[in-house]
Amino acid sequence: MSSVRPNIAAMAGYVPGEQPQGGKFIKLNTNENPYPCSPAVERAIETVLRTGLGKYPDPMATAFRARAAQLLSVGPDWILCGNGSDDILTIVTRAFVGQGDLLRLPYPSYILYKSLAEIQGAQAEEVRFQPDWSLGDDFARPAHRLKLAFLPNPNSPSGTLLPPARVAELAQALPCPLVVDEAYVDFADTNCLDLVRRNEKVLVSRSLSKSYALAGLRFGYVVAQPQVVRELEKVKDSYNCDALSIAGATAALDDQAWLRENRAKIIATRQRLYEGARQLGFDAARSQANFVWCPHAKVPVKPLYERLKSQGVLVRYMNYAGWGDGLRISVGSDEQVEACLTMLKGMM
C-alpha cells in the first residue's frame, strides 16, 4: 500500500513465539508460567465482573501503583503501568527516540527492541555480548543521535545477568537513558531497582506475565524517577490498562506468599533442566530466568526443534546471524521438562 510510511513498509515486523490454537502441546517456547495464578487474582476479577464493565478503567491504575510502591519502597509517582511490559517499552521508545535517531541494544537479545526502533524511523545499533555473555565498554560509548539504550537483564535468549554494579557503570557512561528490562528478574538473584533511585537516566521495566503467571492478562510497569514518569504519561494511550487487568495485577502483588512458592518451584525445575541439557551435550548457559538457552556444538538443533514439535513439544528455535543458533527451552512443570529431556535423549 503506497500510503504506508516507507520505514514501516520496509520492516519485517516482530514475530511472537508460536501460540497454537488447536491440538495438544507441551508449551515450552514462550516462557509462560506452567502453574495457575494466585486464586486472589481470580477473586479480584470476579468482583470487577459483578460490578460491571460499563465505565472506563482508572487511567493511571492507581491501586496497582500504590501497592507496587509499598513493595518496592518508592512513591506511587515513580511507577507507570502498561498493557504488558512490551507496551512500556513502546511508550519509552516513543518518548525518547525520533526519526533518524539511534537506539542501542545488546546482541543477541530481545528482538522486539529493533522493531520498536524501526517503527520510529530510527536506527537500531547492536553491540555484541562477549562469548561469556558479559558486555564490554562499547555498549556505553557516545554516538551521534544516540537517544536510548535497552538492556534485558536477565537477558533473552541466554538467561544470563549482568551484576548491578556493571549496569551502574554502563548507565553512568551512557549519554542517554538506559532501560533495564527486568521481565524475568523475579527468578534472578539480584536486580537493578536501586539504580533508579541513584540515576535519573535509569528506568527499570517489569512484567507480571512470567513470575505471576499472568501472561494472558497483559500487565507490566516501569519504575523511574517522577520527573521521567510525568513525561512518559504524555505518551501512553488514555486507558492502556483495562479494569480486569488492574484488579488482577493488584491482587497478584498482594499474594507474595504465592510468588515465593512459585519462584522456588521454577528455580528447582530450572536446575534440573540445566543439568539435563548439559548431560545431553548442550552448551547450556546458567540461567537467571525461567528458561535455559541450549546451543550444541556438534548436533544441529533445528531438526531437534522440528522433531519435538512433531511429537507435541514446542520449544523456541532461535538463530542469530554471526552468533549461532540454539533452543530456548522454557521451564515448565517437572513432568513437562522431563518429557522434553526424554524426547531429546532419544533424538541425540
Image (spheres, rainbow, N blue to C red):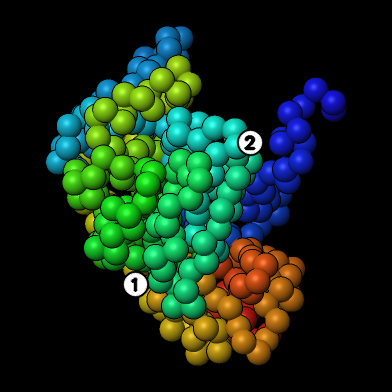
Tags 1 and 2 touching, CB below 8 Å: no
Q: Residues within 10 Å of mark 1 (few under 14, many from 20)?
A: few
Residue 47 percent coordinates (x, y) = 34, 23
Give the residue pinned by disc 1. 268
Residue type at numbered disc 2: Gly
The residue mark sitting in front, 1 or 2, is 2
Q: Is residue 86 above or below residue 238?
A: below
Residue type at numbered disc 1: Ala
Q: Is residue 144 above or below residue 314?
A: above
Going from N to C along the chain, the mark reached first, 1 or 2, is 2
Give the residue pinned by disc 2. 121
Residue 170 percent coordinates (x, y) = 33, 58
Q: Is residue 161 left or right of residue 193?
A: right
Q: Residues within 10 Å of mark 2 (few under 14, many from 20)?
A: many
Real-space CA distance between mark 1 and mark 2, rounded to the nearest whole angstrom: 43 Å
Q: What residue is at 45 percent from the left and 43 percent from the top?
A: 148
**Image quadrant for the N terminus?**
top right
Q: What residue is at 70 percent from the left and 54 percent from the top?
A: 23
**Which residue is farthest right?**
1
Write down the quadrant of residue 153 in the picture: bottom left
**Image quadrant for the C terminus?**
bottom right
